[in-house]
Image (tube, grey):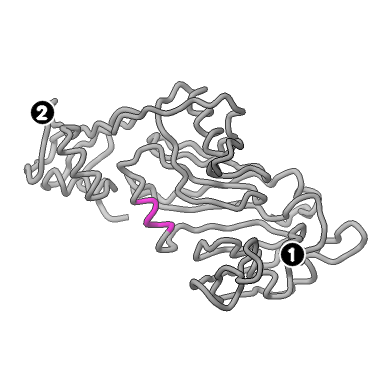
Amino acid sequence: MARRPFRVLSASDDAVRLAVRGACTCRELLLAAGVSRSAAAAAESAHRVCREGVPLQAPVALEPGDVVELLLEPADPEFPDVEPAAVAWEDPAGLLLAADKPCGLLVHSDGTGAECLVDRVQARLAADGRVREAHPVQRIDVDTSGLVLFSLAPEFQAAVDAQVADGSMEKVYLTLLAGSVDRELTVERPVGRDRHDARRMHVGAGRAALTRISPLAPVRLPGGHEATLCTASIHTGRRHQIRAHAAWAGHPVVGDRLYGGPAASGLMLHAWREAFTHPLTGQRIRVEAPVPDRMVPFVPEGAL
């Protein structure tokens, strides 16, 4: 990890304090800390970047030993009366949070008033006495469970969004696929909307998509049918990507009736592990969500 021109002194829901350790300008410091150009300009114009209480604006020169405080944009969140989200990982710097989404729950509101993961994360923050607004930086299907990363500070969200867009955020799913998968499969085929069924995605046309499937253990489904416990790593994030690619490869996800998978008590697809670079510290963060109850019977001892 390259040496950064600062050291993090503290981070809270209100401010981030940085000790300068290399000559730079105020703007250079903010950009090195993972703040987007637009957010840095907005913070400077709103007098939210200070040295010893004095607001700074680019191109103010900073020297080693200076302490710069970035006051985070004030939040005015709603506090929904719902069950708080299960949290898989909490950021010591307070800028991010990874929630463990149960299957059957939307990530975003669909406008109908139905409860969603955003509501539950906001309720979790409220229960912890935190006045921040949670914004998901990724989404997973309603019937898929597992990790969803949230940004809690808009100043740093663009740096995380960029990792989702360029594929540097590693995403590994745990899944149960129909049939015997006896070797690694790489499916690099575009995925787009199915012109004949708006619910489905079509493999062969649309946007580029890459999925790598690795078998972990053979299992038997109720009734004796063969299946394989696998991991699926995605390098792009297209809608239904794993489900569509797995079905195209002849091994649909168990429980995925939409793509021809055998019946089960829920979709056997779980966003299991994730790795990304923290926008402020530059550290590589790895997060894991527990195997959900519906999949536990199909995970042989020692398979993970």
The picture places residue 255, in percent across and down from the top left corner, at 77, 57
Q: Residue at x 84, y 66 (%)?
A: 226
Residues rendered magenta in the picture: 159-164
- Residue, disc 2: 54
SS category of the residue bearing label 1? strand
Q: Which mark is on residue 99? A: none
Q: Amino acid at mark 2?
A: Val
- Viewport quadrant of the N terminus: bottom left
Given contact means CB atoms under 8 Å apart, are the residues at marks 1 and 2 in contact?
no
Judging depth in this view, the residue of 193 and 118 nearest the camera is 193
Question: Helix, strand, or loop for circle 2?
Answer: strand
Disc nearer the start of the sequence (1/2): 2
The three-letter amino acid code for the residue at tag 1 is Leu
Instruction: Give the side of residue 156 with respect to residue 30, left or right.
Output: right
- x and y, in percent, of residue 137 in the image: 45, 48
In the rendered image of this protein, does residue 265 appear above or below residue 131? below
* Relative depth, front residue between 223 and 23: 223
Between the C-alphas of marks 1 and 2, the distance is 59 Å
Looking at the picture, does residue 137 appear above or below residue 121?
below
Q: Position of residue 72 (x, y in %)?
A: 28, 33
Q: Residues within 10 Å of mark 2 (few under 14, many from 20)?
A: few
Residue where numbered disc 1 is placed = 177
Residue at the (72%, 55%) spot, across then down:
268
Please state if 128 lies on the left or on the right of 146 as rendered. left
Q: Residue at x 79, y 71 (%)?
A: 180
Q: Depth check: 111 or 6 in front? A: 111
Compared across the picture, whether 121 is left or right of 45 comes to right
Instruction: Give the mark count.
Output: 2
Residue 122 shown in magenta: no
